[in-house]
Amino acid sequence: MPKVLEFKLPDLGEGLTEAEIVRWLVAVGDVVAIDQPVVEVETAKAMVEVPCPYGGVVTARFGEEGTELPVGAPLLTVAVGAPEAADAESSEYSGNVLVGYGTGEAVRRRRRVRPAPVGAPPAAAPVTPSGPPAAAAPGHARGAAATATGGSSAPAAAADGPVAVISPLVRKLARENGVDLRGLTGSGPDGLILRCDVESALRTAAEPATAAAAPVPVAAGAATAGTRIPLRGIRGAVADKLSRSRSEIPDATCWVDADATELMAARAAMNAVGGPKISVLALLARICTAALDRYPELNSTVDTAAREIVRLPAVHLGFAAQTERGLVVPVVRDAQARSAASLSEEFARLTEAARSGTLTPGDLTGGTFTLNNYGVFGVDGSTPIINHPEAAMLGVGRIVPKPWVHQGELAVRQVVQLSLTFDHRVCDGGTAGGFLRYVADCVEQPAVLLRSL
């Protein structure tokens, strides 16, 4: 007899507690081999494919695409030793492990669904392409009443009983946005309410009333309807980190305009001799690492529990990259040991990975200082928010021709605004100003950088 093993969402590392199902890579009935990717998920750090440590036949999937699942929640079940799996790997378990699962003792049986008390949220039902989900606990309704406009009716829920919902996360989404689940008709099997049903109700509520609709009086002080966008995934992680930075770090910002004409000329000369092209970002990064060598206070972090400033030995340089999925900050490891050419190559590699959604959690963590080139958005200045738990961030505006006094005469020069936001706990304004002034001097006279090479 085949054994049915339950594969749960593993701990993907870096303190991540949940992930959103982006795309299923297998269907119920498919034969999977050991370590075969079965689902693509998006965490707050990156998009990753999750391999299954078991070989066998997929008997159930848990969660629709777009559903968020906590670490440890069931992903799918696999029948190991089934006749259909004869061509799969003969071994039942993988030797390759992710954090949270691996080659331990097999799960001997599927988790039983115990009857829940009336009012408790139902467990997530397995999603299958050709068949109903597992039966709900006694007393659980399988849908809501049909709408007044007609359409297929689902079995109505008891007036005081729970409504069948695909997962507690969908129930939470409805509760937080004031959606009455009893007024919805689920589009899932047997009227099961899915995330898309709740989101559709939210969109409908946000749409303006038609001309034929009677006006509805709004009580004084009542909030107006609006589009609600859940803070989850990368957007949610960015919100949490920026809020923490603002609440924990006493930051200050200083800025200076610099004449970047000579820097741009030096870059043109470097690229004229052939070989890999050197980017402006790479030159600024090389200047940053030299400045941090002079002012190590800014390459540090604050241990609030121990009340200590920890100066870090290596510069792991983060840089802001805007993608279709939001803002991410890939990290260049040991930037202080890289040449301008090496930095250019690594920036290009990480930027491409960011745009394609293939950055790993390791690519997005461990930074000690961040370089933010917001000039690509066509703006001159900004006051960056520090990337917690780092101690500083250098912001770079666009490089544009401007009137400038050069050698005592008015001339048109390539000017850039530089801004430094720093944690005032790690240093005072003199140190921050010294760092920024050194960066500006290297931008204006690249030969200054040669003294530190």
Image (tube, rainbow, N blue to C red):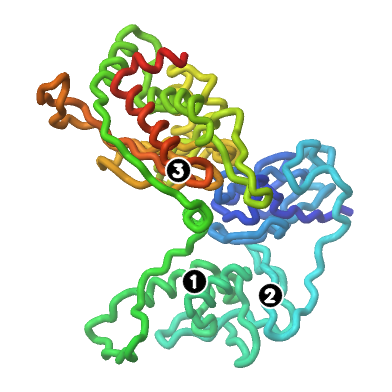
Callout 2–callout 1 Cβ contact below 8 Å: no
In the image, 128: left or right of 275? right
- Viewer-side residue, 381 vs 202: 381
Residue 281 percent across, percent down from the top left: 38, 28
Q: Relative to 149, say whether 24 is above or below.
A: above
Q: Which of marks 1 and 3 is in front?
A: 3
- Residue type for callout 2: Pro
Residue 16 percent across, percent down from the top left: 64, 51
Callout 2–callout 3 Cβ contact below 8 Å: no
Q: Give the labeled residue for mark 1.
A: 197
Q: Residue 122 carries which label?
A: 2
Q: In the structure shown, which secondary structural element does the residue marked by tag 1 occupy?
A: helix
Q: In which quarter of the image is residue 115?
A: bottom right
Q: Which residue is drawn at 47% across and 17% down?
A: 339
- Residue type for callout 3: Phe
Q: Quadrant of residue 160?
A: bottom right
